[in-house]
Amino acid sequence: MAVPLREKDLIDTQSAINIEREDWVDRAIDGLPAKQKLTVLLVYFAGLTCEETAAATDVPVGTVRTRMFHARKKLQTALEKSAMPRHQKRNS
Amino acid sequence: MNSAADHLSHEAISERLPWFVNGTLPDAARAAVEAHLEVCAACREDLRLCEEMAQSVRSGRTIPMPPCASADDLLQRAQRATRSRRSIDWRIAASIAVIAASGLVLVSQIRHASPPNQEFTTVTQRTTVATVDYVFEVRLAGRLDDADRARVLGQLGGSTSAVETDDGTYHLTLSLPPQSLTQLDAIATDMAAMSEVVSADVVALQVPVR
């Protein structure tokens, strides 16, 4: 791991970390099952309420909440995996 | 604050975070979530995840999904679901277009389900996107030579992005500010009014995806 010596490099390093994290977020969303992904899009992209999302996807409100919860947990798992040292990733 | 929102559990708060992020929670629930976030580090971390997902989706970086056969049904339900707001957000159509993957699939389906015009009146106020790529399907008169064809396509505004399809029509992609279907129909009507154009119709919107 490279440790930055100058403030400028520190900022560059932080930017690189942020970009890598964004990449993991994108990939996690991309990898969601279709129903979860549609729910995520309708909530975050279309800005629907929970009830509207339920009506749009023809499922109960509880199912919408569950899908959003599972989508978030998958992202959390992906980000945890991204933070693991390489040899642990290979073994997991 | 209303008493029901006052007594939301940790789990109930956590479940509502996506709608806290998208700004659609009722005031009482929003206040309850804000109060809980001040004392719950786990929910603050979950909130960060929700915000990152929202950022990813809104940025258009997320990759489209495989085609979904029931996109038309989904769209109709989405329109019914939002009818009470008296507006239909183009983003709903775009979300479902993403589900349909190609972006060239959906608008013909959108047309069949088109709601009354007034439901589109707030579209341009709600979106932060400067332009949307709309695809028009244009059929030209058969007698045109190459030069005339290029001239007509250029006049229609899509000369650089016109694609000839297998059945002899052209798909013109025009970047326009977000339009209602009524406005898009008017543009298509103007196209069809040209003597060299047999028919013109808006058939799709392109979604900004990677």
Image: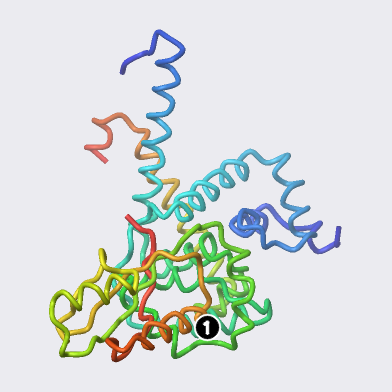
In the image, is residue A65 above or below residue A72?
Answer: below
Image location of residue B103, percent across then percent down: 33, 71
In the image, is residue B174 above or below residue A25?
Answer: below
Report the residue marked by disc 1.
Answer: B182
Q: Nearer the viewer, residue B177 or B203?
A: B177
Residue name at image x 62 percent, y 68 percent: A49
Residue name at image x 39 percent, y 55 percent: A29
Check the picture and name the quadrant holding the C terminus of chain A: top left
Q: Nearer the viewer, residue B17 or B68?
A: B68
User: Amino acid type of disc 1?
Assistant: Thr
Image location of residue B119, percent across then percent down: 62, 81
Residue name at image x 39 percent, y 71 percent: B134
Q: How many marks?
A: 1
**In the displayed structure image, the side of residue B210 where residue B87 appears, left or right:** right
Chain for numbered disc 1: B
Image location of residue B84, percent across then percent down: 68, 81
Q: Residues within 10 Å of mark 1 (few under 14, many from 20)?
A: some
Q: Nearer the viewer, residue A60 or B56?
A: B56
Q: Nearer the viewer, residue B118 or B207?
A: B118
